[in-house]
Image (spheres, helix red, strand yellow):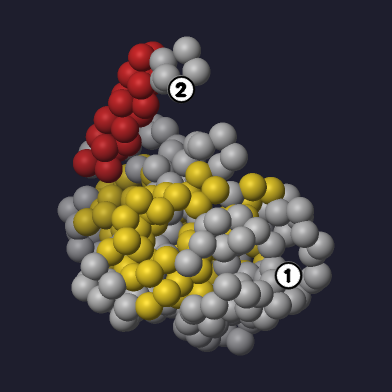
Amino acid sequence: MPGKTSPLLLLAALLLALCVSACLKSGEPVDCPVVPGEQVAAVYIEGQGVTGISGQVMIKSSKEPLAGAFVNIYPDTISNLLGPSQFISSPTDAAGRYNIPLPPGTYYVVARKRMTGQSTGPLAPGDFYSEHQRIVTRVVAGKLAVVDLAVVAMKAPMFFKKEVVERETATGIRGRLVDGSGKAVPGGFAMAYTDPTMKRLPDFASTLSDADGRFTIYLPDAGTFYLAARIHAWDMPQHGEPYGKLGGDQPTPLSVVAGQFVEGVVIKLEPFAGEYLEGKSRRPF
């Protein structure tokens, strides 16, 4: 019946969740399912006394190894997997290989190469970066988790004014990103503006949405905010890219009280139908 979920689908979802959980807890090589927007890397080799992550960075289109790339390790997605990371590798070698000693734990893994050769700083057109996805792995004592990373070239400047949400706060907004049929949109983010125009860089951005589409925007203080959501972190939305505003064409203001979270916000993303103007990262549309 419409509006009801099949018991078989619910059972399949439960089994998938249990399998992913087992993958993250296992210290042995296993084949793990891929949650949309979140890839579980769970292949291990003996560390020969070293605990951490090892792998290769390559260009997605050509499969060529990428030398001089840095691999960033994040313990969570508060920063949107942008900005400074908790750990960073040495530059990849001529074969694109890297190794990072790490304490046991669960981490998000991102690769970047800036043409300036710097290990940190804003990305610019021509730089390489991991596509906007969540690659997570669990580091097991005495072993190396194998995480290979495909990168693509950035074609436009980063969209964010503030690249990173630096810390958790007691004030903010929580909600979900969904598509036109109500299904969760993972690997996207919500953006908060202090005015309803919303044709500029956002004032604040959320954590990446998880497999259930859930996001959190941490705010420094109370205020009234207008929300939008999208997938990519650069340039204006591409034609067909999932994009949406809370309230649609008439953005809905959200009043946030200091020390509290507005809960249950749902932003619907639809294929962007506006005109794309290349490189207009400061005027998205």
Q: Is residue 147 left or right of residue 24?
A: right
Disc 2 marks a residue whose amino acid type is Gly
Foreground of the two, 95 or 104:
104
Foreground of the two, 154 or 224:
224
Q: Which mark is residue 3?
A: 2
Q: The residue tagged with tag 2: helix, strand or loop?
A: loop
Disc 1 marks a residue whose amino acid type is Phe
Q: Is residue 56 left or right of residue 79?
A: right
- Residue 229 horizontal/vertical position (percent): 54, 59
- Looking at the image, can residue 189 be seen? yes
Q: Is residue 248 above or below residue 14?
A: below
Find the distance from the CA under tag 2 to the CA under tag 1: 35 Å
Query: Which residue shows up at 50% across the image and 52% down it?
Result: 267
Name the quadrant containing residue 43. Answer: top left
Q: Is residue 209 left or right of residue 30?
A: right
Kindly check if marks 2 and 1 are in contact, taking CB atoms under 8 A apart as contact.
no
Counting every numbered tag in the picture gives 2
Q: Is residue 131 above or below residue 165?
A: above
- Residue 7 horizontal/vertical position (percent): 36, 14
Q: Which mark is residue 285?
A: 1
- Residue 279 horizontal/vertical position (percent): 75, 75
* Disc 1: CA contacts within 10 A as few (<14), some (14-19) or many (>=20): some
Marks 2 and 1, the one that precedes in the sequence: 2
For the C terminus, the quadrant is bottom right
- Looking at the image, can residue 53 be seen? no
Foreground of the two, 84 or 95:
84
Q: Which mark is residue 144?
A: none
Query: Which residue shows up at 32% across the image and 78% down it?
Result: 222
